[in-house]
Image (tube, helix red, strand yellow):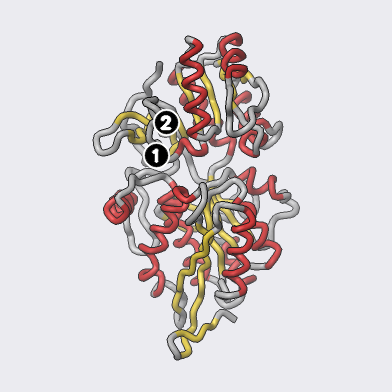
Amino acid sequence: MNDSDISGGRERVLTVGVVVARTGRLTSLGDPLDAVMTLLEPELAAAGPRGFRIRLVGRDSRSSADGARQAVKELVQDENAAIIVTLAGTQVLPAVADTCEIIGVPCLSSTFPWQVYYYGRGADPARPFDWTYHFCWGLDDIAETFADLWAQAGGAGRQTVGCLWNDGPQGAWSRHPQHGFAPAARARGHRLVEPGPYEEPAVDLDRHITAFRDAGATLVTSAATGQDLALFRAQAAESGWQPRLITCSRWLAYPPSPAVSGRQSAQADVATLVYWTPAHPYRSSLDGTTAAQLAETYEQTTGRQWSQPLGLAHALFEVAAHALTTADDPTDRRSVAAALSRSRLDTIAGPLDWTSGPVPNVATVSLAGGQWQPGTRHDYELVVVTPGRTEGVRVNGDLRTA
């Protein structure tokens, strides 16, 4: 049972455990989740099923897989969490989900391509997970979005695209012959130039630059960190070669980091995926807050530029509250997991539906295409340049190419 003795009196409480990076290299990625947790805690207290109060308890993942596993264990053993939520981190997110699957506690996560989450953790449609659920876009969705951007940059028809992929999970799954980015991009008729993976963090990318130039590539795609992409752009410029456009996912979906040693920010004029902005026409299922209002509140309370994970962080708590209130027995973890599996909900991150695939345990998020361009309120702002498959999102700028 998830009853707790609070303030000396018996009160029925349901705990949502939050694994969030507050120290280590992923701290900035944990900021939106931490901020939304603080924002929603008073509201969620009254959003539970009749006779219950929802409370939020966070634990620091320490930006590591070991820290994430320890955080889950503490939330379950010490705080009696009814459900765990988390987002972000190539090693951290799978560690959270795997630990929840082993312990037997419902888990909801986001901001991680669903094929990597699902197949990368050993599931398949015939053998889905029992406890862990996820919502995100797919690697194929990124490929489709980037192909739309390539068409704008290079014209319709076959494009030659250089692939700057690392030797980690991002690069491996980008190349995956069945579930990766590459087969979806090739299905659109494009030629991909793959010199082989580089070791992250990169120290020299001249081999890739030479391969792209020799192959006649005018476009480059990647899932690099900002640091590695900055190195690539600097070395390309030194060699006298420059692609017309770079498309990059992963860290490049976040606001630009400051320029280093006089160089422009790695994100400047880089095109990327767009999964949430203040202009998205979505509202919170909890209180009707709009995407624009959430972004404004975040900037006013934190002094930081809004970032795309903000909307998905908010949706995590919306879905968690929905599962707890629709579960046949919110004090039974298996009942809560079953509620997640049948959830269909319009959230501030858009409509989420776990009943319609693409595989069990997963709901999808649609993508548009955007580009980091010089802004008015911030040094760089994310401009939507192609609507992709996101209904109601309007283009608000033109694609800039070299």
Q: Is residue 304 left or right of residue 117?
A: left
Residue 144: horizontal and vertical position, in percent?
Answer: 53, 31
| Residue drawn at point x = 36 percent, y = 62 percent | 39
Q: Is residue 322 left or right of residue 35?
A: right
* Callout 2 amino acid: Gln
What residue did someone put label 2 on? 267
Label 2 with label 1: CB-CB less than 8 Å: yes
Q: Is 1 placed above or below 164 here?
A: below
Quarter of the image for the C terminus: give it: top left
Q: Amino acid at mark 1?
A: Pro
Q: Residue furthest bottom?
A: 9
Are there few (<14), some (14-19), or many (20+) residues within 10 Å of tag 1?
Answer: some
Can residue 155 be seen here? Answer: no
**Which secondary structure, mark 1?**
loop
Q: Which SS class for mark 2?
A: loop
Where residue 395 appears, as percent x and y from the top left, is: 34, 32
Tell me if I can see residue 195 in this picture.
yes
At x 45% / y 73%, what residue is drawn? 55
Earlier residue among tags 2 and 1: 1
Q: Is residue 235 above or below residue 178?
A: above
* Left or right of 46 on screen, residue 107: right
If the image is split into quadrants, where does the N terminus sit?
bottom right
What residue sits right under mark 1 in the picture? 255
Residue 195: image location, x then y, percent: 66, 20
